[in-house]
Amino acid sequence: MSARRASYRSIASLQRDNAACRACAEAGYPIDSLPVFEGHAGQKAYLFGLAPGIVEGEERRPWRGRAGKALRRWLQLDEERFHETFYLAAVTRCYPGKPSSGRGDRTTTPEERRLCAFWQEWELRLLKPKLLVPVGGVAIKRLLGLNSLACVGERIELDGGAVAIPLPHSSGASGWLNAAANQARLERALGLLRSELAGTDQL
Ligand code: SF4
């Protein structure tokens, strides 16, 4: 059985249990990697994606594939600075595998997302990030409760003084960025994000 304690006092102990989590497999879902996340105590910027892809699942490092390269290009951060800056987590942390069509990656179920929310909720409690960056509609919904990418380009103030700056997913799988208005939303979001990072030495 996957271990989940009633409470955690450190990110290190949370990570030890998260790294060994098999809750979705135990519930009968065909996940295809071990959990993928990366970060350490003290990081105040929390980047929250959808799920690892096949490359990330194999390497057990987040954002290693094409979507990660695009995201770093957007953020103007090299890989080292990207990893220094952000605690990297996701709505679900195991590569979900291929769907029966063989095209793309399997869409995770609400139950898998619910099972994995345990780790995210404890991360936020322990890290208390000042900056939250949900990437893509599912992550935005999970973290902010918003149902649309219309919030991209906004700086959202949260309880406790934290700020959220949502981004669309960088995988290129959706056509959302094909619209000029949405490109402008993305540019606005990236500008906000860069100034948030530049203006906060503690991040
Ligand atoms: S997706 Fe999350 S809850 Fe499911 S097995 Fe992986 S780490 Fe555990």
Image (cartoon, rainbow, N blue to C red):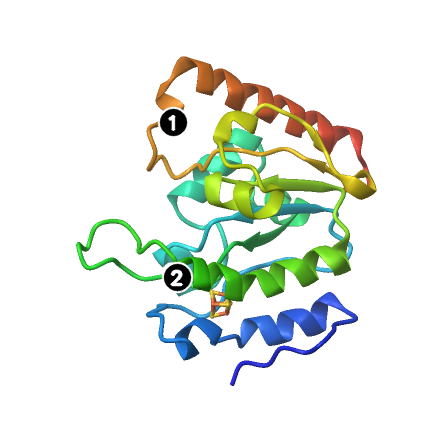
Mark in front: 1 vs 2: 1
Nearer to me, 196 or 182: 182
> Looking at the rendering, which quadrant does residue 201 occupy?
top right
Q: Position of residue 152 (x, y in %)?
A: 55, 27
Q: Which residue is mark 2?
A: 95
The residues tagged by marks 1 and 2 sit, at their Cα atoms, a distance apart of 24 Å
> How many neighbours does mark 1 have within 10 angstroms: few (below 14), some (14-19), or many (20 or more)?
some
Q: Which residue is mark 1?
A: 176
Q: Residue furthest left?
A: 101
> How many neighbours does mark 2 have within 10 angstroms: few (below 14), some (14-19), or many (20 or more)?
many
Residue 179 drawn above or below residue 20: above
Residue 99 drawn above or below residue 5: above
**Residue 45 has which mark?**
none
Q: Position of residue 153 (x, y in %)?
A: 58, 23
**119 horizontally vs 35: left or right:** right
Residue 75 drawn above or below residue 159: above
Nearer to me, 169 or 202: 169
Q: Identify residue type, mark 1.
A: Trp
Residue 10 drawn above or below residue 55: below
Q: Position of residue 38 (x, y in %)?
A: 59, 59
Nearer to me, 128 or 64: 128
> Looking at the rendering, which quadrant does residue 85 occupy?
top right
Q: Identify residue type, mark 2.
A: Tyr
Query: Residue sitting at 51 percent across and 23 percent down?
Result: 186
Query: Residue sitting at 45 percent across and 63 percent down?
Result: 111
Q: Position of residue 57 (x, y in %)?
A: 41, 62
**169 horizontally vs 188: left or right:** left
